[in-house]
Amino acid sequence: MTKVLSSSFAEKTGTPTPLAQSGTAASMGPGELVDDVKRMLLAQNAVLVAHYYTAASLQDLADETGGLVSDSLDMARFGHDHPARTLIVAGVRFMGETAKILNPEKRVLMPDLEATCSLDLGCPADEFAEFCDAHPDRTVVVYANTSAAVKARADWVVTSGIAVKLVRYLAQRGEKILWAPDRYLGDYIRKTTGADMLLWNGACVVHEEFKATVLRGLKARHPDAAVLVHPESPAGVIEQADVVGSTTALIDAARSLAANTCIVATDKGIFHKMQQAAPDKKFLEAPTAGVGATCESCGHCQWMAMNTLHKLHHVLQNGGNEIFIDEAVRRRAMVPITRLLDFARAQHPGTLRQGAA
């Protein structure tokens, strides 16, 4: 019934074939390519939103063109509030789907539709529906890193930044939780809240690789360093953290902590924004090598890496790669997302920024 997706998944499936580059883009230098993308964004009334884990060049381009670099839910909300009629989502497929759920009237494009997520792939909608049907007494809470179809089956959608507060709230009401898909994040929430939680057996191929034993050695060599950990990481890594939090929370911690060195256990794409937030600090990757390591991702998501400037140029020049969601599924998925947004407003009036994957 449950589905395990370990770091060997990429090896078994291989990397999807990238889009072909257009002839024009292939002949351009980096500066010309960026300028042409900027021109097409303006001409097509389009805005670029990019996740923290994408390439620095895409993050900079989003910033320079009035777009956004953030977590997945902020990306979707920004697209909703922005007047552009076309959203270009540089990230993985569930992020494009979330943007479409919140912005059905807009065209949502992605540089590569094959850029997906191990958590999404590891929680097929049909198997998850059977799992839910087998436990009808439980409130279904799913992480944002899921497909539109899985969200449509849920009572609540949560981000890593608000999951603990939401589950604690539900537990205080006497509700038992069915959680999916990340077992490490679910275990962290369960330990933190004491809630009765039944966990789907999924994992992120990047965060699962961080090694607790080797991290202790790195900390010993840098005793004054702060350890920043995303809660999708294994328990032995989380236990060594000075800060556990979402991507947004970790960037905020990098800026505000007194430590001059930070050891970071999340996708290394985030280092670009961390370095901008704290240019005088040193950031070290938490180890994915050492005892028991396979290091297939080596701290960076292979699917996030599929987002490139050439692919962005290609989709703007030639169209395609549009996200479509069945309207009935979209409407059902909107219900738990709306509950999340309403809960976030109640927790923090005047702001919705809670941080996601």
Image: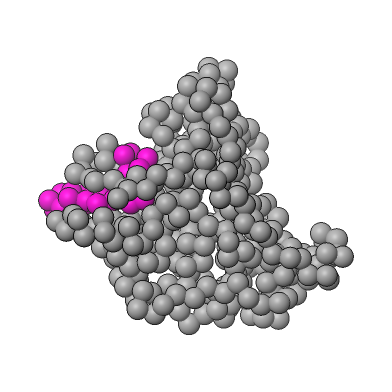
Q: Magenta span has 275? A: no
The image shows residue 13, relative to residue 48, as above or below, that is: above
What colouring method underlies this structural image? one colour
Quarter-wise, where is residue 137 in the image?
bottom left
Quarter-wise, where is residue 152 in the image?
bottom left
Can residue 249 be seen by looking at this rendering? Answer: no
The image shows residue 302, relative to residue 83, as above or below, that is: above
Residue drawn where x is 44% and y is 30% of the image: 237
**Depth check, front residue: 278 or 191:** 191
Q: Is residue 309 left or right of residue 125?
A: right
**Depth check, front residue: 31 or 252:** 31
Residue drawn where x is 32% and y is 57% of the image: 127
Q: Position of residue 162 (x, y in %)?
A: 34, 52
Q: Position of residue 166 (x, y in %)?
A: 27, 53
Can residue 229 be seen by looking at this rendering? Answer: yes
Q: Is residue 112 left or right of residue 78?
A: right
Residue drawn where x is 56% and y is 32% of the image: 294
Q: Which residues are magenta?
A: 165-188
